[in-house]
Amino acid sequence: MTATTPPDNIDRILRMRFVVCMGALLPGLGCYFCIAYTYIFQFDVIKNFTQSDQCPDVHSSLPPVSYAIGVWEPQRFVWLFIMFLHCPPRIFFLIVCSWTLCFEKYEIIWRIKLFTFVSGLLLSLSTAVSYPLFLAYCHPAG
C-alpha cells in the first residue's frame, strides 16, 4: 500500500513553506539589499566614513551594518518595512504549529514556541517604541 498525499494537503504544505520562508529569509535579504544599496548608490558616504570624531583622518570602507540599515536613508525605511513584513509570518507560523501539536505530548516544544512568540512580540513592540524616541532625541530635525 502506497501513501498518497491529497492535493489540498500539498497546497497546505506549500503555503506553510512560503510562510516559513517569509519569516526566515526576509531579514537576511533585507539586510543584504540595504548593504548593496549603500555600496551602489551612496559610495561617497562610505568612502568618507569615519567612525570616530577624535580621528577624522582615519577612514573605513567597511562601515558597521547598523549604519547601513539604521541610520542612512532610504535604507532604514526599507529595513523597517522588511521587519514589518517579517513579523506576521513568524507569529502566524507559531500559532499554526501550536494548533497541530498536542499540548501534553509536546509540552517542551510548546514552551519553546511560546517563548519565541513572546520574544518576537516584545522585539516588535520595543522597536515601535524605541525607534521614534531615537529619531526624536538622537537625530533632531533642523
Image (cartoon, helix red, strand yellow):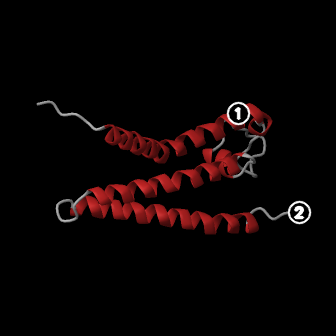
Label for residue 67?
Answer: none
The kind of residue tagged 1 is: Tyr
List x then y, in percent, for residue 58. 73, 40
List x then y, in percent, for residue 43. 76, 34
The quarter of the displayed image where residue 7 is located: top left
Counting every numbered tag in the picture gives 2
Label 1 SS: helix
List x then y, in percent, for residue 38. 71, 38
Residue 61 visible in image: no
Label for residue 39?
Answer: 1
List x then y, in percent, for residue 29. 56, 39
The foreground one among 102 and 120 is 102
Q: Please say if 24 is above or below 108.
A: above
Quadrant where the C terminus is found in the figure: bottom right
Label 2 SS: loop
Is residue 73 toward the left or the right of residue 18 in the image?
right
Q: Residue at x 22, y 61 (%)?
A: 102
The quarter of the displayed image where residue 119 is located: bottom left
Residue extending farthest left: 1
Residue extending farthest right: 142
Residue extending farthest front: 7
Q: Residue at x 74, y 41 (%)?
A: 49
Is residue 110 toward the left or the right of residue 132 in the image?
left
Residue beneath disc 2? 142
Mark 2 or mark 1: name the one nearer the start of the chain.
Answer: 1
Q: CA distance from mark 2 to mark 1?
A: 27 Å
Is residue 17 toward the left or the right of residue 82 in the image?
left
The foreground one among 38 and 30 is 30
The kind of residue tagged 2 is: Gly
The foreground one among 41 and 4 is 4
Q: Residues within 10 Å of mark 1 (few under 14, many from 20)?
A: some
Q: Residue at x 18, y 34 (%)?
A: 3
